């Protein structure tokens, strides 16, 4: 890390997947920082992501964020059809 730069870039720049952006939008700033840190090369676990994001209680935060992201990812997007393909017939 360079002096004067944030430890984690929490902007959504580079995320082109609308579903990922939708999930990130549903998270708090702290949760976003952990989730984005988890997507970075070399960050192999949610625990590590929480530490990289400088979460105050990394073990508690990592579990809360992991569960919330999983719950959000499992929710239907509203863009899928009954057959789950997302295509319109």
Image (cartoon, rainbow, N blue to C red):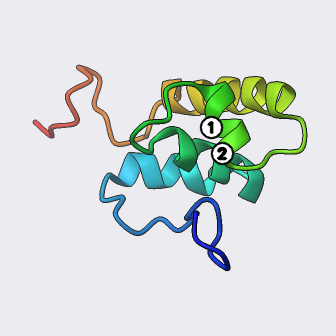
Which residue was labeled with disc 1?
49
- Quadrant in the rendering for residue 13: bottom left
Q: Are marks 2 and 1 in contact (CB under 8 Å)?
A: yes
Density class for disc 1 (Cα within 10 Å; few <14, some 14-19, many ≥20) is: many
As measured in the structure, the alpha-carbon distance from the residue carrying label 2 to the one carrying label 1 is 5 Å
Extreme-bottom residue of the structure:
4
Q: Nearer the viewer, residue 69 or 36?
A: 36
Q: Which residue is mark 2?
A: 52
Q: Is residue 1 left or right of residue 41?
A: right
**Residue 59 falls left or right of residue 29:** right
Q: Which mark is residue 35?
A: none
20, above or below 68, in the image: below
- Taking the spot 30% from the left edge, 59% from the top edge, the residue there is 16
Residue placed at 68% from the left, 26% from the top?
47
Where 10 falls versus 31 (above or below)? Answer: below
Pick the quarter of the image with the C terminus. top left
Disc 1 on helix, strand or loop? helix
């Amino acid at each position: 890390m360079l002096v004067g730069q944030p430890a984690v870039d929490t902007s959504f720049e580079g995320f082109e997947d609308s579903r990922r952006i939708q999930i990130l939008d549903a998270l708090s700033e702290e949760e976003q920082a952990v989730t984005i840190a988890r997507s970075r090369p070399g960050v192999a676990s949610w625990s590590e992501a929480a530490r990289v994001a400088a979460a105050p209680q990394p073990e508690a935060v990592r579990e809360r964020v992991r569960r919330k992201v999983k719950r959000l990812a499992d929710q239907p997007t509203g863009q899928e059809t009954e057959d789950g393909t997302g295509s319109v017939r």
